[in-house]
Amino acid sequence: MSPQNNSSITTPQDTYERERLANVHPPSWNNPKPADCYQLVIVGAGPAGLAAAETAAALGAKVALIERHLIGGTCLNTGCVPSKTIIRTSRLYAEMRDAKRYGAQIPDDIRVDFAAVMERVRRIRTHLSSDDSVRRLAAVGVDVFFGNVRFVGADTLTVNEEKLCFKKALIATGARPHIPSIPGLREAGFLTNANVFNLTELPRRLLVIGGGPLGCELAQAFCRLGAQTTIVQDMPLFLDGEERDAAQILSDAFARDGIEVRLNTSAVAVRVEDGQKLVDLVSDDYQNTIAVDAILTGSGRAPNVEGLNLEAAGVDYDAGSGIRVDDFLRTSNPHIYAAGDVCLEHKYAHTATASARIVVQNALFRGRERLSALVIPWCTFTDPEIAHVGLYVREANRQGIPVKTFIILMHEIDRAVTDSEDAGFVKIHVRERTDQILGATIVARHAGDMINEITLAMVAGIGLRTLARVIHAYDTQAEAIQRAAEAYNRTRLTPRIQSRLRRSWTIR
Amino acid sequence: MLGTYSMTPISTLSDEALLDQLQRAAFGYFPQTMNPLNGLVADNSRDNSPVSIAVVGFALSSYPVAVERGWMERADATQRSLTALRFFRNSDQSGSPTATGFKGFYYHFLDIRTGARVWQSELSMIDTALLIAGALTASMYFTADTPDEIELRELVDFLYRRIDWRWAQDDGDTIRQGWKPECGFLHYGWEGYSEAILLYVLAMGSPTHPITGDCYKAWTATYQWENLYDHDYLYAGPLFVHHFSHAWIDFRGIRDSFMREKRSDYFENSQRAAYIHREYAQRNPHEFAGYDENCWGLSSCDGPSDEQLDVSNEPRRLFGYAARGVPYGPDDGTLSAPSVLASLPFAPEIVLDTVRSMIARYPEMLRDGRLSSSFNPTLTDANECAWVSAGHFGLDQGIVLMMIENHRTERIWRLMRDCPYIRNGLHHAGFRGGWLQQPSTPGAR
């Protein structure tokens, strides 16, 4: 996906970039001669396409993988990988400034070399791109094509005029940044995840529009790298749909970082004056204008469904919600499936990968695996991180499921205290009067790692009683999960049981 | 108003005498800050304070207590109440930017001389509910067949029936928090347990403009039932949330479907909230000065501020007037003694010791015998005295006065148990059991 504006902000053409392109879109690449008919043709080589290609090829299927831009998709090139990399550096700067909290000296001269920060981003992205390289895919037997895809029939598509026939196809074209329709925004220029990692100079003043995961992560990272950052969100809290206490902790963390937080606020107009971008903000009846040097939009993602001529293949889609699939990820054409951001509500790399594996099973092996059976965790990599899996309380309430939440605050956990990382909590939701886990939210410095234990428990059908018996290494922050399970166990000791126990001791 | 209070050293007072002294001092706030020409009462005792309509509700609730305790003549109390009620009846209800109200609701803050909207404040549903609860308290108390008291009751009935609660739903599932002539309904609603339970009960009890029945269910669907520090409770962070509705409604033994399922009730819940606040202070995760088992209470209150209004990448640590809460914060070391004292009916066994201890350790937060809105022992002056909020806030004094009264005599609760609108509202919300199963007191309205 190329930037829709500010196309002048391109990736610096350095050694790293040349090596990355050699991995994910070699300039001299010649598409192979197509096979007569492929068992699986995959459109899009992001996490979903790659997972499907590797799995299907390993199982002996004849597979074609078609990418119009870069192998690895958003995740590797303009998403998870570069954002986590920049976040790590920004955390380090935050810790340097906060050194006194750890009994350490604040370095005398904390200067951010933004060009070096971004060079590290490019270096690490390039390093990881070797995992997804064309050479590696070709070596495992995948026919890799670069070019634009158009469906021309129910079982045929073209890649740059070359015809490919398939028994089954998977559409995994992903999504692109949704650009809010704010008058003047396009003219003024803006950043999205597609081009923000190309920056080599730090904007002095940055406005982030949208308080979703990407907006929150990058607002905090850029603030910590020294940009005077404002974030506007047209909802009462960040991360719409997330647990409100989690979102509240995030708001507080932002305020501590020095981010200007503007909730319940919309950006309604942008104009350029004297080389700076002036943005009109409206919050109910309060209006003001702020001047910034760059605007980053982080308000959702739009599925890539255009230009594929899906009508010719009989594949139904909607420009907003993407390709329509059933619970088996099959489209309205029974031979064509979809996976990943182009069709899923939860647009995460790991969900894309999981959905692609379902497609391989269902398309090639007549499997009956269901999307709805997946237990999908996710994490927003702010500081603290916010991770969730399963049901939220309000969802359980709506479904009439009585729910109770066991909470352990991170300040109850020794390791969180010793690390001065005690903001946050583990909340585990169970069906009332049982130990069955319905879902969990974790807010902690390493919540993304911690949520995996809950996901495992949910997938394996393990309840809190069992989790309480699992010895957790001391001193770890994940001990909070065991402590929540122990809190559950204590509620089983009702006053009646306690008095019976006391009586039994007396008799002895 | 009759007499004044005299200060006796706290440590020498019996519990009853201490409570009497604090309650009477709290009551003193209302006559002191009331405009006798319109009955409106200031939000706080600082210069140029506007009126808070909620504080007027607390004032109206306080007069019957003062009459019963001999601090005010009944005729005086009636006149003060009548003056305020007449003001609201005659007020500009056009909803214009300088009116007093709209659709029977009132703007949150009013000019104390003219009663016109100030600060571009919102038409406030919850604050109107607190005002009208106070008005209903007056109508339940002033039941004599005298022209004044008859007029008072008629005025209250008129004001209550005029409120268009249904409109405040804005065709949504729950009641909106506010409305402004400049932009219409504010675009956030109520989420999670809060003091709005009183608002919902009043809105469901209305014979004229009730909200739809599933509105309450939609609100309670946002509740969070949590086990925290080994206490099961319905979560709400700031302590005042566990008090305000309870000032008027006796929640002991009555349960809606949520509490029936949880085998608890809202009264017991407020008790657990007090214990959780105490436990939090004992743990004192942010290592603030003063916090311990006898010094706790995070709530909506005044507080020190950074005075950093411009955008700068400096860490923000102080929150000014804010809804501080447990356990998720914000917490800047500021504690609210009035919120602790308001927990008295629920947990007297820990509240009295705490209040004594807080006053003994931080006597500077008791001014004119009244508890200041808040104090912050982490921020001390040159004399090692804790930061103390200047002046007093009407909401603090009102809730302290009412909760002490409910603890001592259950007077407000008993009055309001007989209020037909409250009973109706509770029934519509699905409350059953306890005193709701008993008929109203003979002779009550």
Image (cartoon, coloured by chain):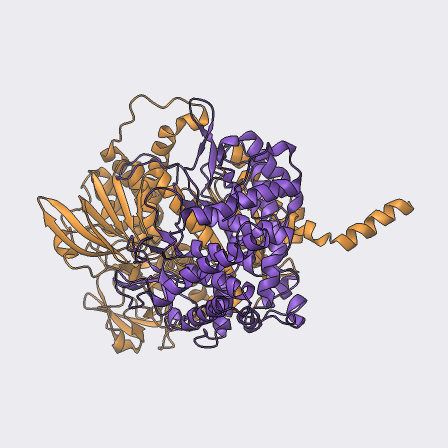
Chain colours: A orange, B purple
Identify which residue is drawn at 52% across, 62% down: B137
Identify which residue is drawn at 41% across, 37% down: B390
Query: Is the residue A206 above or below the residue B68 in the image?
Result: above
x%, y% of residue A199? 21, 42
Report if residue B190 is visible in the image. no
Residue at the extreme right: A507
Q: Nearer the viewer, residue A140 or B392?
A: B392
| Rendered-image quadrant of the N terminus of chain A | bottom left
Q: Is residue B299 shown left or right of residue A297?
A: right
Q: Nearer the viewer, residue B408 or B303?
A: B408
Q: Nearer the viewer, residue B15 or A365?
A: B15
Q: Is residue A494 shown left or right of residue B149?
A: right
Q: Is residue B197 shown left or right of residue A295?
A: right
Identify which residue is drawn at 91% across, 47% down: A507
Q: Is residue A494 shown left or right of residue A344?
A: right
Query: Is the residue A204 above or below the residue B395 in the image?
Result: above
Report if residue B73 is visible in the image. yes
Query: Is the residue B395 above or below the residue B145 in the image?
Result: above
x%, y% of residue A66? 28, 61
Q: How many marks?
A: 0
Residue at the extreme left: A274
Q: Nearer the viewer, residue A66 or B317?
A: B317
x%, y% of residue B324? 46, 45
Query: Is the residue A183 above or below the residue B17 in the image?
Result: below
x%, y% of residue B138? 51, 62
Q: Quarter-wise, where is residue A212 in the image?
A: bottom left
| Rendered-image quadrant of the C terminus of chain A | top right
